[in-house]
Image (cartoon, grey):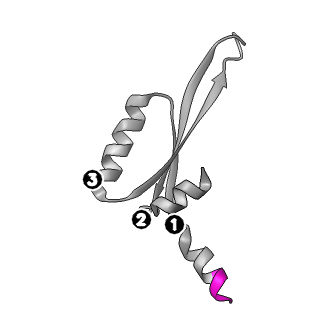
Amino acid sequence: MTTEAVLEESAEPGEIYTAYFHTVQELTEALTAADTLGLGVRVESYTVTSEEDPDSHTTEFKFTLLAEQPDHTEAAEEA
């Protein structure tokens, strides 16, 4: 295994679990808990269109709990 491969492998914090939230309140509770425990998180938002009303959109959130907090430079590179 090359040094570069080791660095790439260790750069990604281990994922503990992923949850999907429908409200900002649920997301905020999860973020507060992760902060209290000193764990890292990754949050992604996405828009969901209702099947009954194609003009109706809601925002939902994918929350991934990480074993450690990612480096700030990592987050900037992904964005």
Residue 13 within the magenta-colored segment of the rendering: no
Residue 78 as seen in the image, left or right of residue 39: right
Look at label 3 and name its amino acid: Thr
Look at label 2 and name its amino acid: Glu
Q: How many residues crowd mark 1 within 10 Å: few (<14), some (14–19), many (20+)?
A: some
Q: How far apart are marks 1 and 3 (CA)?
A: 18 Å
Find residue 23 and report its image quarter: top left
Q: Nearest the camera: 53 or 70?
A: 70
Q: Nearest the camera: 16 or 24?
A: 24
Q: In the rendered structure, which segment of residues is drawn in magenta?
A: 1-5
User: Can you identify the residue that label 3 sits on?
Assistant: 36
Coordinates of residue 64 in the picture (x, y in percent): 51, 51
Look at label 1 and name its amino acid: Gly
Coordinates of residue 17 in the picture (x, y in percent): 50, 55
- Residue at image location 31% in from the left, 44% down from the top: 32
Q: Nearest the camera: 65 or 7?
A: 7
User: Can you identify the residue that label 1 sits on?
Assistant: 14
Relative height, residue 54 to residue 46 (above, below): above
- Rendered image: mark on residue 68: 2
